[in-house]
Amino acid sequence: MKILIIGAGKMGEAILKAWLLKKFSFKINISVSEVNTRRRGIIKNRYSQLSIHKDIPISWKGDLVLIAVKPQTFNNMAESFHSKKIDTKIVLSIMAGISLDKLKKLVCLETTYVRAMPNLASSKGKGVTGVYSNKIGNLNNKNKVQILLEALGSVFWLKNELQFDPLTAISGSGPAYFFLIFLILKNTAKSFGFTDRIASDLILNTAEGAVEIFKENSNLEKLIEDVASPGGTTEAALEVLMKNKPNLISILNKAILTANKRSKKLGKNAKRL
Ligand SMILES: NC(=O)c1ccc[n+]([C@@H]2O[C@H](COP(=O)([O-])OP(=O)(O)OC[C@H]3O[C@@H](n4cnc5c(N)ncnc54)[C@H](OP(=O)(O)O)[C@@H]3O)[C@@H](O)[C@H]2O)c1
């Protein structure tokens, strides 16, 4: 499969790395276009086997173009696209807030357009990616996108484009919610006298154990009940988390709804770019 990545910043590189590490059943040939001199130097150093250029090639024919530039620089990028001869079966964009309509309008190629929203853990192959296309073309295109995105972790096809906002609020921002809880637990463990190392290990192993149990049993209310025996320590802790006003549930709900709102607003701003 012949791929052109435009923009090898944080996310572009995370995806590039995941694709290079993955053992696909087909050959993969990746070229990179990165305007930023410093970033291009880093990428050339790390992936010397690849063809890495400043500009989008004058002429390129292949299977998939990945657009991984910032939404603010997309207009400029799209302009430079028009003077080139690009022939691709799929254009895959990971730009936050750039709708498929806008993507088609600016890229202006007769091809299949797909929009995806990966998250930070994609670089570890443990990411969560939401994906949508209103016209995937043929099953072959859908399979290709599915296989490529699976190299980043789990893939969820969305029912419509509006679902990108809640997806961003849950799985896009999600790692930060967990990091915050880990940080609070870690600092509290340290305040009890545990070393930094032991505090980290306590949190990490507890989280890994909880995830393993959740994988086997999705009844979270029951799982909480299993840990919180009547009159015990967990029950005492949960009482503080749930009975105070606002309780943890309403704080987290409000936080996620606010993230959802912000995502919508950023999408509206992107329309005006
Ligand atoms: N970071 C995340 O966790 C995350 C998660 C999901 C989706 N995304 C989306 O992924 C996209 C990239 O985000 P990022 O965090 O990776 O941004 P980033 O680190 O700024 O990477 C974008 C790179 O593309 C370069 N670039 C700009 N215009 C270009 C052009 N015409 N041709 C080639 N390269 C060009 C930029 O150079 P300059 O810096 O010189 O402009 C920069 O090095 C964004 O649209 C974002 O919404 C990011």
Image (cartoon, rainbow, N blue to C red):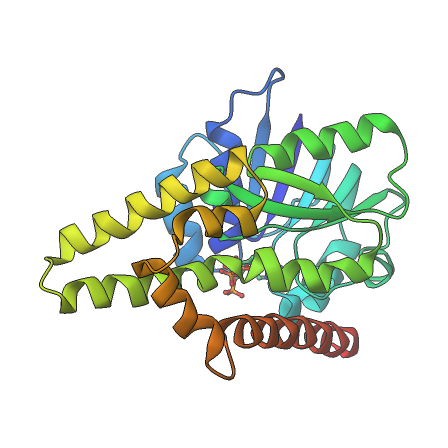
Which residue, as the protein is rendered here, is positioned at the far bottom? 245
Q: Is residue 99 above or below residue 246?
A: above
Q: Is residue 229 left or right of residue 2?
A: left
Q: Is residue 93 left or right of residue 193?
A: right
Is residue 103 among what the camera can see?
no
Image position, residue 214 (x, y; %): 50, 41
Is residue 224 among what the camera can see?
yes
How many numbered callouts? 0
- Say which of 44 and 267 sits in front: 267
Image position, residue 182 (x, y; %): 34, 60
- Say which of 188 and 66 sits in front: 188
Q: Is residue 255 above or below residue 166?
A: below
At a point 70% along the width and 33% down the height, the residue shown is 146
Image position, residue 238 (x, y; %): 41, 66
At a point 65% along the width and 67% down the height, the residue shown is 71
Image position, residue 63 (x, y; %): 74, 32
Q: Is residue 250 left or right of residue 267?
A: left
Q: Quadrant of ligand 1?
A: bottom right
Which residue, as the protein is rendered here, is positioned at the far front? 231
Q: Name which quarter of the figure residue 137 lies in.
A: top right
Query: In the rendered view of the protein, which quadrant contains the C terminus?
Result: bottom right
Query: In the rendered view of the protein, which quadrant contains the N terminus?
Result: top right
At a point 72% along the width and 68% down the height, the residue shown is 75
- Say which of 104 and 152 sits in front: 152
